[in-house]
Each structure stands twice: as C-alpha cells, then as structure tokens.
Image (cartoon, coloured by chain):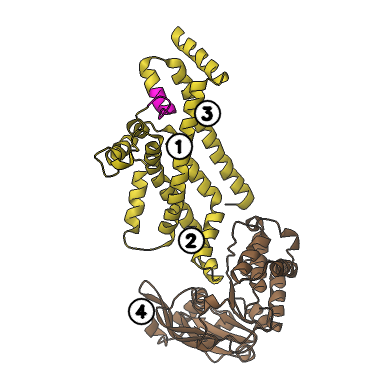
Chain colours: A brown, B yellow
Amino acid sequence: MTGKPAPYPVKLENVWFNARTKPLIKDISATFADEEGLTVILGPNGAGKSLLLRLCHGILPAHEGLVTWGGGDDPGLHDHRQAMVFQRPVHLRRTAGGNIDFALKLHKMPRLQRAQRIDEALELTGLSRYRATPARLLSFGEQQRLALARAWALAPDLLLLDEPTANLDPAAQRLIEEVLLKMIAGGTRVLMSSHDLNQARRLASHVVFLYRGRIKEQSSAEQFFAGPKNDLAQSFLRGDLLWWRRRAVFAPDPDKEDDKF
Amino acid sequence: MNDIWQAMATAVNLLAGLDASLVEIVARSLGVSLTAVVLATLIGLPLGAVLALSRFPGRRVILVIMNALMGLPPVVVGLIVLLMLSRSGPMGALGLLFTPAAMIIAQTILVLPIIVALSSTVIESLWQEYEEQMMSLGAGPWARVLALLWDGRFALMTTVLAGFGRANAEVGAVMIVGGNIDHVTRVMTTAIALEASRGDLALALGLGIVLLLLSLAINAASYSVREFARHRYQA
C-alpha cells in the first residue's frame, strides 16, 4: 500500500440522485480521475457538489444509473483504495493517533508499520505533539488537518475532499494545500469540491463546473480559466450571483426543463 | 417520637457493628441485583445495538414497547415470573420458585428494557455522527459495532447504572418470586417491608440507610462517569 498509486478512475453513467422526489443530481455521465492531478468541482452553493462527491466515493447509492471504479472491476469502498475528507471532520472519541490507527487497522496494516505511519502522518500535518491528545479536544483547524493526516496515512489511489478548507484561516489552508500537492506529486488522484476560485487556480489540473445538479462544463484547468464555453460558467468566473443573473438576463431560460422536476 | 430516636440509634449501631444479619441481607441483595444487571447487560446491549443500527419492519414498535416497559410495575413482573415458575407453570419443573435464581430472573426482566431502550438511543445518536466516516473508511459491521460500543462506553455505563438503581430499589417482584424467606431469599427491600410491618424499626431503618447510600453512590458514579467523558472526549 506504500507503492505508487494505481489509476483509479470513477465512472458515472446516467446517474440521478433525488431528495424525496426532487432530483438534485440530474443524469450525470462523466469520468473523473482518469488522468493524474487534481480535479476541482466548482459551482455555487446548492449545485450538488457534496452529493456528487459522495456518489463518487460510494457512500451514497445512486437512485438511477451506475457508478463504477477502477475500470468497472473494483467493488468500490471495500477495496480500501479511496479516502475522503469531509467538510466537517468526524473523529472517534480517541486520541489523534488512535484515530489514524483505527483507519489503518481497517486496512489490515501490521502493528509496527502502523506506529510508523501514524508518526509520519502527524509529522506531515504538524500534529506530532497531539498524538496522545483526544481528537475531539483539538481545534477545528487541527481536526481538519487530522482528517487529512488520516486520509494520507491510507495512501489512497483516489482522494476526495469536500471543501476541506472552507472554514480555515490562510495558514491552515496553506498547510492543507501543501499536503495535497505532495500527494498529487506522489501520484494520488484528487477530486475536490470548492467554491474558492483562487484555490482552484492554484491546485487544479481539471475543472468540473456543476450547476443545479448538472455538469455544465468539464475541461482542463487551463482551458476553463482562459474562458469557459458555458455561459453560466462564465458568469460564475466573473463572480456574478447565478440565480439572480439567470432570471434577470437569460430569457427564455435554457435550463427551464430542470424546473419541471 | 422517642421510639423513632431509639430505633435510629440502634440502626446506627447495627451499621457500625456490621451486624451479621444485616450484612447477610445486604450481600444477598447486591448479589441478586448485580447478577441481574450483568445478565440484562449481556442480553440488552447487543439488542440495543441491533435496534439502533438495523432497519426492519417492526423496529419502531419494539422501541416504543421497550420505552414503555421501562416503567413496568415490578409486581406485575413478579406475578408473571411466578406463573412461569410455579409448579404447574411452563418452567415449573426447574424448581426455581422461591430461590435467589427466581429473583435474578425477575430483576433481569425488569432491567432489560431500561438497558435496551437507553443503549439503543446512545448507539443510534453516535452512529448518526459516525456513519459517513465509517462507511468512508470501509468499516465492516463488526468493526462498526465494536467502535460504537467502545466510543459510547461512558454513556452506556450510565445506562447500566440506571438499571442497577432500578434493580436495587424494587420490592414487588422479588417479594413475589422470592417469598422473603429468611437466610434464603430475604433482601434489603423485602426485609424492610417485613420488619416495618412487624415493628422492628431498627433493622428496617438500618437497611433503609444502606439503600439510600447505595442509590446515592450509583448516582454519584453515574455523574462522575458523564463528567469524565465530557472533559476527556467532549462526548
């Protein structure tokens, strides 16, 4: 598990996800993480970024359509090739080291190796002195770093992050980005949601623009930031409020069919 | 008024001198109630975990019933166990009626709903918090249950203590199935009931003081466990 990460693409085919009867992810067909680097999922609040990530991670079942991993022959989560960092970190009622240990034990790592891996993970995220501190006593930023340390320790082929730096100060944000860049350089493929354009510019090699549960644009970061084809993506880049602009400017609404659902 | 003070003085003397019959009754009481609580915990915790973590038709109904049974009148339990264990009952052949075993059975039935209902609440709320992370880590059913029981250990301990409090304090069930036989099935609560009606207030008061202290100790223990957990894990 310490070898170079293997290619681990996530493929979605006609995927729908509903809350009761309201569709929130609408007929998405796409492949992520088939190339190296970080793919950022951009989009306004409520676009479905978190849902899309959870579907890609396999912790939410699609109501319609199919999600497959590793070219279709991988059972998903139970192969232990993915890790996810949530927007709000969740830690067990144990020490910081104990939390990483719990994850490594699930991956059947031998005891001695675990101890060393925990040291490295805590060192990397600047949490070494908190090894024996109960995780839930750490500050929010430290807990988020611990969540990333845990994900790093698992050496995943695919790492998913749901707005990992949304509530962090610049220093904590930079530390997390540094760890991410290290993982990307090591070959881990990253799928991350964000609404922070500057962060996306710094980290992303690919961009997915999500709006009201549909992928409006998927391209390389270079292309996207040079000027996206999609009009909604353009106004998102300009920093306009999308829902407001759409009602005021675009008529008739090309996305109107969505409102029927 | 004088009688009461005299009884009180004698009671304190009995306690201070560790009177043999008093110690015997207290020991039997603790033995019966502790055994019942251990049994109820062994049965109730897994049941509570299953009710908290699985989804099957009738689950809610069982939870409502378990909550209702927390207030089960002890005399009713005593009556039912009596019918089961009486010579003509379905388990009469075992010859358990009027033995400590019968009292343990009755108290286990009394304590079980408390442990099931409270522990399933504890485990369910912890699971809501952990669910996504556990799924993300690919934790199987066993790893999940063990982690929940371990992480919920302080809250679960307080549910066990609540069960112990109930077992200790009840008189109806053990009176009916135990029969309050001296040196065999006489426990604190049944002894108090008897001695009070006979007018031997000293022993009744002495045992009453022990019961009160025990109840106080249980609640103090419960409180300290909660406080410890709060400070250590923000639980």
In this rendering, do the residues under marks 1 and 3 share a single chain?
Answer: yes
Instruction: Give the labeled residue for mark 1.
Output: B33
Residue located at (36% from left, 32% from top): B178
The image shows residue A115 at horizontal and vertical percentages of 71, 66
The image shows residue A36 at horizontal and vertical percentages of 64, 88
- Check disc 3: other Cα within 10 Å, few if <14, some if 14-19, many if 20+: few
Q: Nearer the viewer, residue B131 or A254?
A: B131
Instruction: Give the labeled residue for mark 4.
Output: A261
Q: Element under label 2?
A: helix
In the image, what residue type sits under mark 4?
Phe
Q: Tell me whether circle 4 and circle 3 mark residues in contact (CB < 8 Å).
A: no
Query: Residue B128 got which mark?
Result: 2
In the image, what residue type sits under mark 2?
Gln
Q: Nearer the viewer, mark 4 or mark 1?
A: 1
Tell me the chain of label 4.
A
Q: Nearer the viewer, mark 4 or mark 3?
A: 3
Q: Element under label 1?
A: helix
In this rendering, do the residues under marks 3 and 2 share a single chain?
Answer: yes
Q: Tell me whether circle 2 and circle 1 mark residues in contact (CB < 8 Å).
A: no
Magenta includes B190? Answer: yes
Q: Quick one: quadrant of the N terminus of chain B?
A: top left
Q: Nearer the viewer, residue A120 or A60?
A: A120
Q: Is residue B165 visible in this depiction of the protein?
A: no
Q: Is residue A197 above or below residue B196?
A: below
The image shows residue B166 at horizontal and vertical percentages of 43, 37
